[in-house]
Amino acid sequence: MGACKRKILAQLPYKPTGAQSRAIAEISADMDSPRRMNRLLQGDVGAGKTLVGFMALLQAVEARGQGVLMAPTEILARQHLEGLRPLADFAGVRLEILTGRDKNAVRRQKLADLRSGDINILVGTHAVFQKDVEFYDLRLSIIDEQHRFGVNQRLALGEKGIKVDVLTMTATPIPRSLELAHYGDMDVSILDEKPPGRKPIITAAVPLARLPDVITKLKTAISLGRQAYWVCPLVEESEFMDLTAAAERFKVLRAAFGDDHVGLVHGQLTPAEKDAAMAAFVAGKTKVLVATTVIEVGVDIPNATIMVIERAENFGLAQLHQLRGRVGRGEAASTCLLIYQHPLTESGDRRLAILRETEDGFRIAEEDLKMRGAGDVIGTVQSGLPKFKVADLDVQTSLMAIAHQDARMLLQSDPSLTSPRGKAARTLLWLMEQDKSIRLISVG
């Protein structure tokens, strides 16, 4: 282990979990090998993926290269920046951020420093894909929440260096059968332990008719110094309607708590407006943050101990689990209130029951698969099983493991697919209209 990594681990106020230590070792071995790394880091909410990713970035820097960490939203990118910059400074590593808001001279200077190698680690959004973003020597690309980026985007990022190792991270646990079906060409590290000291989150379902009681109890909690998220309902898959619902709830809560105590954040705000709303909440100026699902991934505010999800029956299980994971990050006990409209459908009732029963994201993923099928993990389809040309995942799950092992052995012995068996595999891929997979196999 390099000096920078040892230095950071030694000064952490906690000891990494066994799962984190294993993942760090697996990634380190991949990066040391001549083979290009293509690894999925799969971890439940709050399992510590960011630390594992940062250790990998430090290894790239210690090898005299650069690393990039790409996040799907600016809120998450800036949170990575705030969390990692103190560690980077301590290690003597320069870390910068690049987003769409960087303009003119500021952007030009960052790009120049990136090309010269003065910037060691870059955190960014989709802005890092731009053609004029050039690295001095990119060694590692980390993609947070892989399913939010297209394959071609990940390929473009991987081509910004000569032999770029790729680590993709997801906080949405994936059942083993789907892991093989969707990520069979990747090595997988799993973080299935929570850091010590994390308290369980109390989860309760409350009918919409009791909304006034929820607001009354929220007032009591806020008077004791707590903060709360209030996530507004998904409305008919319409961003405009979602926004309208959030704006209406914002007005009601502002009337109840006072104009200065309630903030609003949604996808249609400008970056500056989002930053201002989040900064006010982080600083404790606003006590309740009304939001659409823009806060689903990554937001980490320890003093926020209450998560209210309105019309929770309209959300998927994985999404509810992600939203609940925004609380329970500090020392105080946390609560998640699932507000539902009566009467519940059978599936809606089952989803809320599972959330109340467990915080284990891997079990929740398995239950979700049983209830609605897998959907398209890296696409937009949210229900139904993946579409295969021949296989039936429901019936032939066991064959996935055999096919996965066989394909990995073939790639290891004949990576260019030029042997008779390799050529047969190429022909089969062409017949199944999957020949593009050969080109994309290194980006997940």
Image: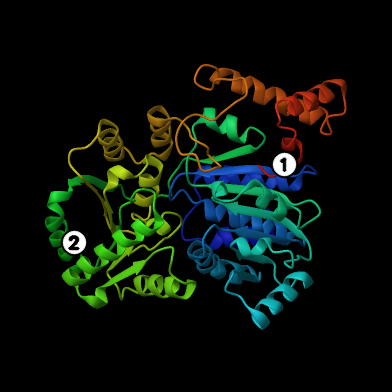
Q: Is residue 116 above or below residue 438?
A: below
* Percent of width and height locating residue 122: 65, 65
On residue 156, which mark appears? Answer: none
Answer above or below: position of 146 versus 368: below
Q: Amino acid at mark 2?
A: Leu
In the picture, measured across the screen, residue 288 lies left or right of residue 365, that is: left
Is any atom of residue 300 visible in this view? Answer: yes
Of the residues under marks 1 and 2, which one precedes in the sequence? 2
- Location of residue 377 in the rendering, given as x and y in whole percent from the top left corner: 53, 39
Nearer-the-camera pick, 345 or 91:
345
Per the image, the residue denoted by label 2 is 218
Please state if 38 lies on the left or on the right of 256 as rendered.
right
Mark 1 to mark 2 CA distance (whole Å): 49 Å
Q: Is residue 400 above or below residue 126?
A: above
Residue type pointed to by label 1: Leu
**Is any atom of residue 197 visible in this view?**
no
Kindly indicate the quadrant of the structure image that contains residue 9: bottom right
Q: Is residue 340 left or right of residue 398?
A: left
**Residue position marked by numbered label 1 in the rendering:** 440
Residue drawn 59% across and 34% down?
182
Residue placed at 65% from the left, 46% from the top?
Answer: 151
44 relative to 429, above or below:
below
Is 37 left, or right, of 256 in this rendering?
Answer: right
